[in-house]
Image (cartoon, grey):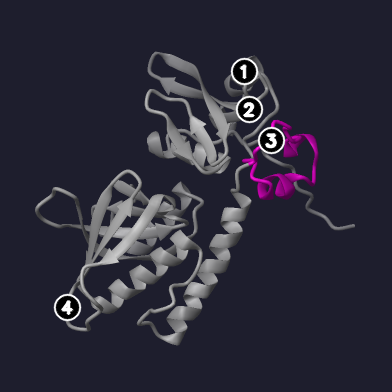
Amino acid sequence: MAESPVGVYKRRDTITALPLYYSGHLLKKYTGEKDFKKCYGELRGSTIFLYTDQMHDTYSEKLDLQMLKSMVMDAPYQKNRSTIYTLTLSNEEVQLKVDNPNTGEEWRGFIMTVATREIPSKLQLLPGQILRLEEVLSEEQKRQAACSPLLTTTYPIHPSSSPGNTYDNTLNGIPLCFFPVSRQKAEKMLKENTEYGNIILRPSTDNTNYAITLRQDNPSGPVMKSYKVLSIDTGFVIELNSPVTVPSLAAVIDHFLMETEFRLQPYLVPQPYDTCIV
């Protein structure tokens, strides 16, 4: 029996914590490509995840709208023709084609609202659709505020050390897998508590930046690796062979999750809950 799309959507929700704002069928091609290719797109947070079709739960490509420089329509909106948009990102240029112009106008509204954090002034949309954009704008502004870069070398106490601070640390932009520990201590935690996850964010050795320590499980046995994360005015730089710049510490964690196709998971210590109100 074929699986329903609902089951696929639920599995995608377990892969990323990013909120789903909009989705639908698209045609896509990069600069230099001759033909458009069919795909299914989901706008989650400020990222468009592209799937080969509606039933795949693992994305094949993604477009980071925080890197969007411009979005240009190839021709004015018309009811009876396909709509093509050219998205110029800081690292690439891609065209998205939507056969239904009304759907294309919705895509434009959602993309520009998320990318610019304001609703475009001229949209061919119904009042209910505009209301949905207002809801998305409010939700995205709150999400981005929670992920804002923390440009300081003062590291907060981890929630596990101070009950009740869990939400405060999240809102201050510190992922819950942050622990103010040394590299050796982080490796010890990852070895002894494999069920908690395998990525720890911690202070760097010089205490002026951050670092990622992770455990990768290979057939020959677990391997520990550490990566330096530099704090800059516009966000953070992950020091790889090809350095990666991201806007927040949460995005640092997301990068490792996505690059490993979510085989890695943040190290989260279970918190006890009471079951009786006295």
Quick one: quadrant of the C terminus?
Answer: bottom right
Q: Amino acid at mark 1?
A: Arg
Quick one: quadrant of the N terminus?
Answer: bottom left
- Crowding at label 2, few (<14), some or many (≥20) Cα neighbours within 10 Å? many
Q: Secondary structure at mark 2?
A: strand
From the viewer's side, name the closer residue of 157 and 88.
88
In this figure, which residue is indicated by the disc labeled 2? 202
Report if the CB atoms under discs 1 and 4 are less than 8 Å apart. Answer: no
Q: Which-is-in-front pick, marks 1 and 4?
A: 4
Using the rendered image of the protein, determine whether residue 231 is visible from the camera's viewpoint.
Answer: yes
- Crowding at label 1, few (<14), some or many (≥20) Cα neighbours within 10 Å? many
Q: Which-is-in-front pick, marks 3 and 1?
A: 3
Taking 180 as reference, is 209 left or right? left
* Mark 3 → mark 2, Cα distance in angstroms: 13 Å
In this figure, which residue is indicated by the disc labeled 1? 183
* Mark 4 → mark 2, Cα distance in angstroms: 52 Å
Q: State which region is magenta.
A: 150-175
Q: Is residue 152 magenta?
A: yes
Q: Say which label, 3 or 2, has the lower sequence index.
A: 3
Q: Which-is-in-front pick, marks 4 and 2?
A: 4
* Mark 1 → mark 4, Cα distance in angstroms: 58 Å
Q: Say which label, 4 or 2, has the lower sequence index.
A: 4
Say which quarter of the image contains residue 197.
top right
Q: Say which label, 1 or 4, has the lower sequence index.
A: 4
Say which quarter of the image contains residue 184.
top right
* Mark 4 → mark 3, Cα distance in angstroms: 51 Å
In this figure, which residue is indicated by the disc labeled 4? 81
Query: Where's residue 159, x and y in %?
Result: 74, 39
Q: Secondary structure at mark 1?
A: helix
Q: Which-is-in-front pick, marks 4 and 3?
A: 3
Report if the CB atoms under discs 1 and 2 are less than 8 Å apart. Answer: yes
Q: Say which label, 1 or 2, has the lower sequence index.
A: 1
